[in-house]
Image (spheres, helix red, strand yellow):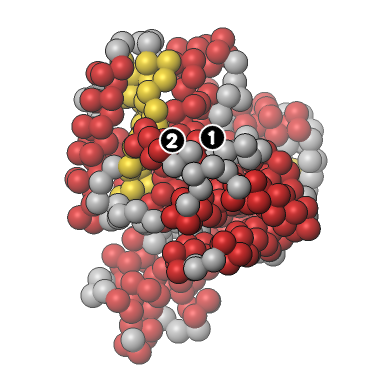
Amino acid sequence: MFKVFIVDDEPFIIEGLYDIVDWAKLGMEIVGHAENGAIALEAMKVTPADILVTDISMPVMNGLDLIRHVRAVHPELKVIVLSGYNEFDYLKEGMALGIENYLLKPINLEEFKGTLRTVVQKLNLNRSELALNEQSMRILRDNVMYRWLQDQISPKEFQERADLLGIELDQRYVQVSILRAGHSMAEVFDSVMNQLSSSENVVPFRDMDGDIVLVFNADDVSSCKEDAERISDNLRLLLSPHNKICASLGSVEKVEDASQSYSHAKRAQEYFMVRSADRILRYEDLASQQQETRLGDWPIDWNEYKKEVMAKDKKALFLRIEKDFAYLQQLEGMTPDLLQEIAMEWLIRFKMLLQEITHTDDPEPYKGGLSQIRRATTSAELMEMIKEAAAMTVDLLERDVKSPVVQQVLNYIHDAYNQDLSLKVLGSMYNIHPVYLGQLFHKEVNETFTEYINRYRIEKAKELLRTTNMKVQEIARKVGYWETGYFYKQFKKYVGISPTEFKGLS
């Protein structure tokens, strides 16, 4: 049993916390309580605890001072703050002290229980402070690298952070490789990190779309290309037996133009809609083909298309398509085959626009359009299909009413649902306060963060119960529950029967 100490100057809060949580079922016991920080500090010298649940605003000694004093002798103590004040300064100072969560009163019971379960998992796994720091550093590293490749950070600011994070990109040229897996991206990334642990001149990270990005760095173009192709292909072959791995290579660029290589690698990824994943797609090969067919010389302003898609202006989109299509038709040397290639490129561009705006990657809605383009027999049919793709892009955008950060959090949950997830970790990842993120998530998804994760994990567990011979305990761990008893409780809550009974029906 992990020991819990509660501190609050309101007696009814303490009494409520004793009653509303089944502490024993969570593997915890309350060993004491106090009405202010000074009393708690003395009591905890005699009765040490693993977890401190404390208010902030209290007489004699407030919660923040209590945390500082206790942490001086018990640095591994897990702290959960309950506060009636939604003050940024309190939140900021609490985060600096390493609290697990900052919960506003009145307490959201499910979020509180979810935080307690997360703390228990951390204690059970004996995660050291070093491990937590490594996780935070990885999140920060991913964020810095992504901003750099998006040209969202100045060279000076990037270099300062790169020095701090141990990112070495001090040679002249870079080439970006992107690996996109069919499923289990978090597990694939861990495998990639293990494989690259002894490799030099390559910086791996995950971007906001969940793709694995490898930035290769060398002093000459040929070495950069050779390393990028060899390592990317080796990783693709190593991981392919267990997953569909799409690997693409951007162009070789000078370090200061790395964003161009990243953009090209992203662009090449989209061609897996019409190409097999049995080999690497190189942007330079696609660019060469486009040059042969004059696709690279289009007088088309894709930024204007993006503006009209974001404005959801179908009429303006249709007029622009008609104008651009008419211009392309009258170009000297235009052929039916070339016009068909152009129509495919148009459709891929719309898919990329949607992905850029929503940070989701679902090629399925566009695959039908590609098939129709291949079967088209007239230029009028081709133009109509491009219009349909434009209209579909707007419709999909209208359905996606979630803010980008909530959509990114949902994508991350779907990919890493079996990991230790919390609003604190995700808030840090996406540069948003955990409290605000929880409120925004609840507003847009109509479920609390904890409810959504539990429901999603249970759906994954049902799938494993139907399709595998794994034991219930193994499935519980596979979907992110380290306590089988809690897994049983959640499964029965969402399904109505126990996992064992469900397996018997399958």
Circle 2 residues within 10 Å: few <14, some 14–19, many ≥20 = few
Q: Amino acid at mark 2?
A: Gln
Q: Is residue 95 in view?
A: yes
Asked whether, in this view, residue 294 is left or right of residue 224, the answer is right
Which residue of the protein is positioned furthest toward the bottom in this rendering? 505
Give yes or no for contact between labels 1 and 2 (Cβ–Cβ under 8 Å).
yes
Give the mark nearer the N terminus: 1 vs 2. Answer: 2
Q: Nearer the viewer, residue 237 or 331?
A: 331
Secondary structure, mark 2, is helix
Label 2 belongs to which residue? 291
User: Residue 166, located in which quarter of the rendered image?
Assistant: top left
Above or below 217: residue 33: below
Residue 455 x, y percent position in the rendering: 52, 68
Q: Residue at x 50, y 41 (%)?
A: 295
Secondary structure, mark 1, is helix
Q: Nearer the viewer, residue 32 or 308?
A: 308
Q: Residue at x 49, y 63 (%)?
A: 373
Above or below 251: residue 441: below
Q: Amino acid at mark 1?
A: Asp
Residue 29 x, y percent position in the rendering: 50, 54
Q: Residue at x 65, y 32 (%)?
A: 94
Q: Nearer the viewer, residue 93 or 405?
A: 405
Label 1 belongs to which residue? 297
Residue 208 x, y percent position in the rendering: 52, 41
